[in-house]
Image: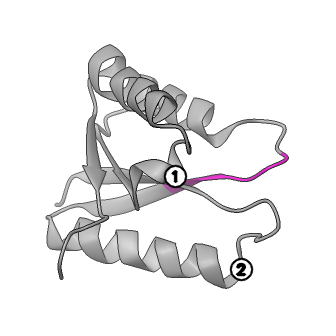
Amino acid sequence: MRPGMYGYMRLAANGGVGDEGETIRQELMTHAEREGFTLEQMFVEQVPTYEPAFDCLAAALRGGRVRDVIVPSLWHFARLPGLQRAMRDHIEREIGARIWIVQGVRP
């Protein structure tokens, strides 16, 4: 049985989940499977939101057996490089999970 992996993405405020979200989800699922994982759950950040997906992702990582997270690019964490680093550090150093970044990976 393959280990599980969570996915995380941020969608544009005017985009909605629709085609963009489904395309990204399929790309993440394909990459996860190629690396020997099963994409168990997607955390999708949308603005505006009542419960931030990043917080839900962090809570799921703390409380479960999944230790890997796949993202399309660090831009999906935040647009500012400093905030990207902070969010990545939070997952990797404070929670102890591993981040997989698809951007720049060739099929």
Q: Name the spot of residue 84 as percent of width and height, x first.
A: 45, 35
Q: Give the distance between the C-alpha atoms of the residues marked 2 and 1, in whole angstroms.
A: 17 Å
Picture layout, residue 19 above or below residue 66? below
The residue where tag 2 is placed is 18
- Residue drawn at x 71%, y 80% is 18
- Residue drawn at x 17%, y 78% is 106
Neighbour tally class for label 2: few under 14, some 14-19, many 20 plus, Cα within 10 Å: few
Q: Secondary structure at mark 1?
A: helix
Left or right: residue 92 compared with residue 85: left
Which residues, given as a range, are shown in magenta?
Answer: 42-48
Q: Name the spot of residue 93 as percent of width and height, x first.
A: 28, 18
Quadrant where the C terminus is found in the figure: bottom left
- Residue drawn at x 57%, y 36% is 54
The residue where tag 1 is placed is 76
Q: Secondary structure at mark 2?
A: helix
Q: Amino acid at mark 2?
A: Gly
Q: Name the spot of residue 59 as percent of width and height, x first.
A: 52, 26
Left or right: residue 73 compared with residue 43: left
Residue 60 lies within the magenta run = no
